[in-house]
Amino acid sequence: MPAGEPFSPRERVRLDEAIRSAERYSRVEFSVFVGVAEGDPRAFATQLHNSLVAPSRSVLIMVDPAARALEIVTGGWVRRSLSDKEVELAALQMQHAFAEGDLVDGLVRGIHLLADHARSPQTLHAAED
């Protein structure tokens, strides 16, 4: 893999597929940033999230492997169905995989877990008489 690239082409495809699948399933936009966080990681992740096309309907996952930083930022619309506890659970799952040295697997697991929790529940309507 080229210097400075965090993922091989195969890993990139796997991550892209996970994002597309999560977006279709949850109707939430997902973005992933892997690289050096400039300054405070939380502030940097928030700034990235705010620059997205639809931040209210988006989840941003920011990972700075060198600083061992992970930040997950959710938009206002997303927070209606995705609680802080569910985000923490996804972060723990990702951190566990990261500790085992598998960045892509951790991201894929986290994306799927976040999408599962962010999915709005379907409502059942009683038939009208």
Image (tube, grey):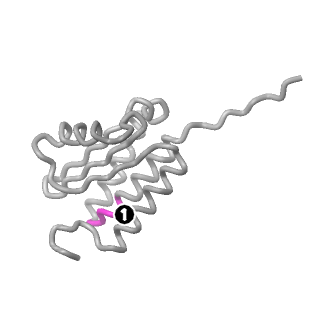
Give the vertical position of 23 relative to 105 (above or below): above
Residue farthest to the front, as pictured: 53
**Residue found at x 12% / y 46%:** 38
Q: Amino acid at mark 1?
A: Asp
The picture quadrant where one finds residue 79 is: top left
Residue 56 image point, x, y percent: 39, 33
Residue farthest to the right, as pictured: 129
Is-magenta flag for residue 103?
Answer: yes
**Residue found at x 19% / y 53%:** 64
The secondary structure making up most of the magenta span is: helix
Query: Where does the magenta region start and end?
Result: 101-106
Q: For label 1, count other residues whose C-alpha is less than 10 Å away and answer few (under 14), some (14-19) or many (20+).
A: some
Residue 5 image point, x, y percent: 21, 68
The residue labelled by disc 1 is: 105
Along the line of sight, which residue is nearer the eye, 103 or 29?
29
- In the displayed structure, does residue 55 sit left or right of residue 42? right
**Residue found at x 14% / y 57%:** 66
Residue 28 image point, x, y percent: 46, 43
Along the line of sight, which residue is nearer the eye, 53 or 13?
53
Residue 3 image point, x, y percent: 15, 72
**Residue found at x 22% / y 38%:** 47
